[in-house]
Image (spheres, helix red, strand yellow):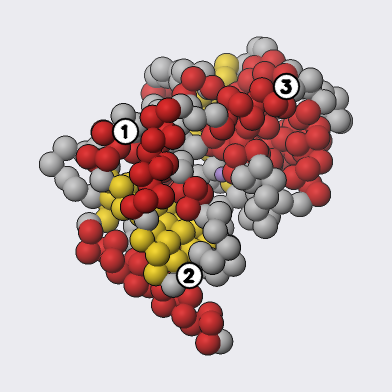
Amino acid sequence: MSLFYELIQKYDVITVFRHQNPDPDALGSQWGLVSWLKETFPNKAIYALGKHVGVKPQLFEAYDLVEDSVVSSSLAIILDTANAARIDDQRFSSAKMRLKIDHHPLGEAYAQHQIVDETASSTSEIIAGLIKEFMLDEAISSKAAKYLYMGILTDSLNFSTSNVTHSTLENAAYLAKSHLDLPKINEELYLIDENEFKFVNRLRNLAIVEKGLIYAIVTKALTEECNITPNMAKEHVNDLGLVREYEIWVLFVQQEIPNQHLYNGSIRSRNVTINDIAIKYNGGGHRLAAAVKNLSLSEIQSVIHDLKGRLYDQKIS
Ligand SMILES: [Mn+2]
C-alpha cells in the first residue's frame, strides 16, 4: 500500500493546505485533491485551508472556515510549499499527522511524512500520478481533473519547461480522459483583459536590458494606473522571456503594504541556475524559476548585480 493511500485511509478528517499568494499549481493541486477526496471518500470530512487570494480566484472555490479543534484532529496534507513559514495558515503544525507533497528543491522537513519529487514539473502532476495509481487508470470527475490539469499546464508553461517529461504528459493524458474541454481551459487561464494588455505594453517599454539580462521594476503607481493588482502584474514575468538574446528575465513588483515601499520579484532563467541567488534575498524556488521578497530599490540593484555576475561567470567558464 502506498504511503499516500495508507495515510488517507487512516484519518477521517483531512485538511489540505498550500502556500501563500497561491498560483494555479498551488490552487489546482489543492482543489483537485480536495474534490477527488470528497468524491472518493464521502464519509470523511475534507477541508481546503488558506485565506490568501491568488490569481484567477474565479477558477477555484472559496476556502473553508475551520475550527482549531478540527485542524488538530486531522491529517494535514501540505501542497507545493518548500518551507513552513510560507504555508498559508500556520495551524498546519497542530495537526495530528502531517504529509508534505511538493516538487520544490531544497525544502524544509516540516512534516512527519513527505512525498517530494524535485523532477516533477508541478505539484499537480505529482497528485495526478498518485490518484492515477490509486484509481488504476480509471477516470476521475471532470471537476477534479480540471483543477489538476490547470496546475500542470501553468507550472509547466504549457508543457514547455525543461522538467516536462513523459510522466508529465502521461499524467496530463490521464486527466484528459475525464472529458476535459482543453481549449476552454486554455481560454480561462490565458485570455487577458484590456487592463492587462495595457499593462503588458507598458511593461515592455519600461524594461531595462543589460547584456543577457532584462528586468522591469513595476511601481504601485503603474499597477494602480492600469487597474491591476500586484499579483496579476507578477504573472507577466514571462512576457519578458520570449527574446532569444535575454537569458535571464526578472520582474519586480511593488507591494500594496501601507507605508512600505518594498518589492517582490520573480526571476526566470533559460539555462543558468538562479535559485541560490534568490535565497540570499528572502526567496528561493526552482533552479530556473525563483522568487525574492521584500526588497528595497537598492537591494534590487544588488540582485541585478549578482545575476549579471552569474551570466558573466558562465561565459568565461
Ligand atoms: Mn508548483
Do the residues bearing badges 3 and 1 touch, measured as CB atoms within 8 Å?
no
* Three-letter amino acid code of the residue under disc 3: Asp
Which residue matches tag 1?
A: 226
Real-space CA distance between mark 3 and mark 1, rounded to the nearest whole angstrom: 31 Å
- Tell me the residue at 63%/20% (across/down): 35
Which residue matches tag 3?
A: 181
The x and y percentages for residue 262 are: 23, 50
- Neighbour tally class for label 2: few under 14, some 14-19, many 20 plus, Cα within 10 Å: some
The x and y percentages for residue 162 are: 67, 57
Q: For numbered disc 3, what is the local secondary structure?
A: loop
Q: For numbered disc 2, what is the local secondary structure?
A: loop
Sequence-earlier tag: 2 or 1: 2
Q: Quadrant of residue 304?
A: bottom left
Q: Quadrant of residue 198?
A: top left
The x and y percentages for residue 86 are: 41, 44
Closest to the observer, 96 or 302: 302
* Three-letter amino acid code of the residue under disc 1: Cys
The quarter of the picture where the N terminus appears is: top right
Which residue matches tag 2?
A: 212
Question: 294 left or right of 215?
Answer: left
The x and y percentages for residue 32 are: 63, 27
Real-space CA distance between mark 2 and mark 1, rounded to the nearest whole angstrom: 28 Å
Q: For numbered disc 1, what is the local secondary structure?
A: loop
Residue 55, disc = none
